[in-house]
Image (spheres, helix red, strand yellow):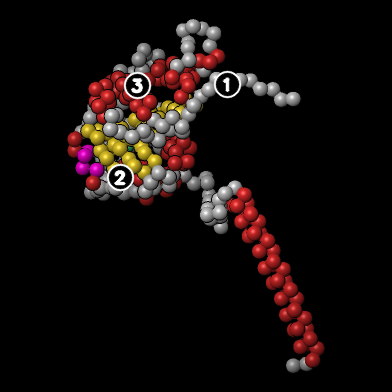
Amino acid sequence: MKESSVKILVRVFTLLSILLVILLLYHHGQTSRITEVQEVIGLEDVPIREAPVDETINPFDTWWKNYRKSDEFGDVFKWNHYFDIYHRHFARFRNKEMTMLEIGVRNGGSLKMWRDYFGPGLQIYGLDIKPNTKRFENKLERVKILIGDQGNATFWTEALKTLPKFDIVIDDGGHTMKQLKVTFDHLYDHVKPDGGIYLVEDLHTAYWRGFKGGYKRQGTFIEYTKDLIDQLNADHSKDENLKVTKFTRSTQSMHVYDSIVVFEKSPHPKYYQIMSQ
Ligand SMILES: C[S@@+](CC[C@H](N)C(=O)[O-])C[C@H]1O[C@@H](n2cnc3c(N)ncnc32)[C@H](O)[C@@H]1O
């Protein structure tokens, strides 16, 4: 090899080495900055994600596509727009220790869905009027099945003596107006006061005669929801017929969707107006 070629090779090698050192120093700087941030916010033990997770993917969609009913767990019975609502309100509970009650077990498929979505921290209770749903108790860990009639006030008074407070309650049971109201009246107080969720689904039955529903018909759960919206705003009422209630003080928000109402609980003080300087 000629002397000039050797010189060129040496220069290229030196340049590449310098570039490598610069890259290494830059990477080290970035890593220490991340560690500093972790220390400041007290998250030393929380791994920083290498790549951003695609938050636009709803895990329920993937679950639904892949799920096949089996001898162990049967089909799941939902409406197609429910999954966005679930994920919007439930995502913060995933992979945490939590308790949930689902009224309406049917073929057990939704119990499996909840376990797969929330993870092993979930302690789930299912309630159904049909005694044969008890068979699902042994199929997943941390699943308890209660047998009873959600429309029976005495059932709730007895059952609630032994049940823990729930992070999430889903009413997907018989869907008659009486069942919905009796259940809400007994269970709402049994939802955790700081961030708990009460979700009633299939509320189209509030418009169906067979379930004692009907447009603006007295006693439907949709009409009751309208009253509860008033109670949520009772601090601003000038009318003595609308007063602050326990519901006002314990409910942070209500979310009304097609067929679903979600109640989010947390202490609700009397708010006051503020004005910037
Ligand atoms: C719509 S299915 C539940 C579907 C299930 N959650 C799912 O997603 O696949 C309704 C269930 O509620 C139960 N049910 C009906 N009336 C009830 C009552 N009064 N008390 C408790 N459960 C009841 C039925 O036996 C049925 O299993």
- Percent x, y of residue 260: 41, 28
Residue position for label 3? 185
Residue position for label 2? 142
Nearest to N terminus: mark 3 or mark 2: 2
182 with respect to 26 (left or right):
left
Ligand 1 in which quarter: top left
Of tags 3 and 1, the one toward the viewer is 1
Residue position for label 1? 271
Q: Secondary structure at mark 3?
A: helix
Q: Secondary structure at mark 2?
A: loop
Nearest to N terminus: mark 2 or mark 1: 2
In this rendering, does residue 222 appear at all? yes
**Magenta span has 5?**
no
- Callout 2 environment at 10 Å: few (<14), some (14 to 19), or many (20+)? some
Image quadrant in which the N terminus is located: bottom right
- Percent x, y of residue 118: 40, 45
- Percent x, y of residue 162: 28, 32
State the extent of the magenta-drawn residues as a range: 133-137
* Figure quadrant of residue 179: top left
| 239 to 13, vertically: above or below | above
